Image: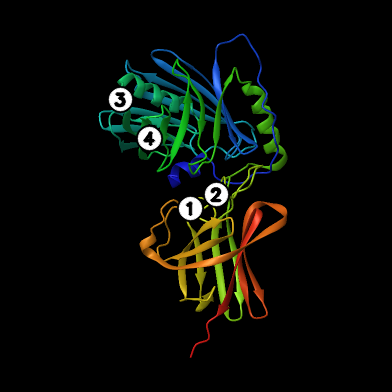
Amino acid sequence: MPPLMFRHLAWLVFVSTPLAVAYAQRPHDDEGFVVCLGDDTLAVERYTRSATTLESEIVLRVPAARRVTYTAALDAIGDVRSMELVVTPLLESSLPPRVSHGMLRFRGDTADVQLTVGDSTWALKVPARPGSMPLAAFSHALVEQAILRASHLGLDSVPFDWVGVGAPVAYPTYVTRRKDGAIVVGFFDAPAIATMDSSGRMLALDGTATTAKVEVKRVLAPDLEHFARAFASAEAAHGPVGQLSPRDTAWGQIGPARMMVDYGRPSRRGRVVFGHVVPWGRVWRTGANEATQFTTDTPLAIGGRKIPPGTYSLWTVPRRDGATLILNRRTGQWGTHYERTFDLARIEMEREILAEPLERFTIAIEPGEDGGLLRLSWDSTSYRVPMSVVTQP
C-alpha cells in the first residue's frame, strides 16, 4: 500500500471516539474534504486553488494528531511542478513526525525530493514519468488535481505516477473515464471511483475497493480548528492512534505442535464486514496490510489435508455458507499479491454466527482433546477448521 505509502498514511487501530462532523457555515468559498473509515473520521482538509497554485491544510489523527500544510505550484495544463510540505504535531507532547518538512520538484522524468527528518536533511532523486503527481497524507485536493489534469488533456485514460512526499517512492497509476462516465483513479492496484460535478469538482471518492477502504466527501468551509481540538483531545486522553490495523501474533500448541500466525487486525468501525468490506467469493488476505503468515514446527492435518512443517501465507475465500482456507507457499508479500500457482492446499471451513459482533478481526488456535481448531472471527461471523498432529510412522 503500496506498503510504504499506506503504512505512512495510517494503518492501525485507535480508541474509537466517534466525532460528529461539524462544519462552520462561513461566507467563504473555500471547500475541502472529510475522510472517513466506517464511522470514524480520520482527516479533514481545506484547500484553495488558483490557475498557478494549490494550497491545502489538513488535520488528521492517524498515525498521530498532526497538521499538514502544503503549497503546490501548477503549470498551464495542471501539472504540479513543485511542492513544499510542513507537518506539525497538534500536541506539544507528541512525538515529532517522521518527516517535518518536505520539498518536491519534478524535472523531466525525475522527482527531486528533499526531506527533513529530525535534525537531518536528505536529498533523493526518484524516477517518475513526466506528468506525475505528488501524494501527501490524506490530501484529496491532489486527487482532484490529477482528475482535472486528465480532463484538460482531453484523454479517456492518462497514466502517471504518484510520488510520495513523506515516503518518496513512485507508484504507477492512472485516471480513466469509463464508458458510463465514472472517473476511476488508481491507488496501488485498486480502483477508487470519483463522483464529479459539471465544473470538475470532485464531490466524493469511494475508496472501499482499495486497501485504505476510506470514503471521502466534499464539504463546504470545513472547520479545521474544531477537528484539530477534537483530535488533540482524543490523543491526550488515549495516546496516538498509530496504525489502523495493528500487527498481532496468535500463538498456540496442539500436542507437540507449536504454531504461530502473524496478521494485521482491522476493526469493524460500524461497517458490515462479510459481504461488504470483505466481498463474498473473493480471495481475502485474512487480515490487513502484509499477507498473513502461518507457521508450524510439526506436520499437521488441517481439515484432513496434510501440511508439512514450515511457513505459509494464509488466505481465505469467504462465502455465506462457509469459507475456503488457502495455504500458499509464497511468503513475505503484500496482502494484495496472491498467486494461486503457489497454493499448497485449499481447505473448507465451517461458518458460525456469533452471538455478539466482534469489533476487531481475531485469529485463534484453540487446543482440544483430539487436536484443536483454527478459528477466524470478525463482526458476527466465525470460520473454523479442525487441526491435528500428523503421527509420524
Q: Of discs 4 and 3, which sits in the foreground? A: 3
Amino acid on which disc 1 is placed: Arg
Determine the secondary structure under disc 1: loop
State the separation of the CA atoms marked 2 and 4: 29 Å
First in residue order: circle 2 vs circle 3: 3
Q: Is residue 226 left or right of residue 245?
A: right
Determine the secondary structure under disc 2: loop
Question: Which quadrant would the N terminus be assigned to in this image?
Answer: top left
Marks 2 and 1: in contact by CB < 8 Å? Answer: yes
Q: Which residue is mark 2?
A: 278
- Could you tell me if residue 302 is visible in this image? yes
First in residue order: circle 4 vs circle 1: 4
Q: Which residue is mark 4?
A: 163
Residue 77 location (% of width, % of height)? 32, 18
Crowd around label 3: few <14 · some 14–19 · many ≥20 (10 Å): few
Q: Which residue is mark 1?
A: 282
First in residue order: circle 3 vs circle 1: 3
The single residue placed furthest to the left in the displayed view is 108
First in residue order: circle 2 vs circle 4: 4
Amino acid on which disc 3 is placed: Leu
Tell me the residue at 68%/58% (across/down).
353
Amino acid on which disc 2 is placed: Val
Crowd around label 4: few <14 · some 14–19 · many ≥20 (10 Å): many
Residue 247 location (% of width, % of height)? 56, 54
Q: Which residue is mark 3?
A: 155
Reply above or below: 8 against 266. Answer: above
State the separation of the CA atoms marked 1 and 2: 8 Å
Q: Of discs 3 and 1, which sits in the foreground? A: 1
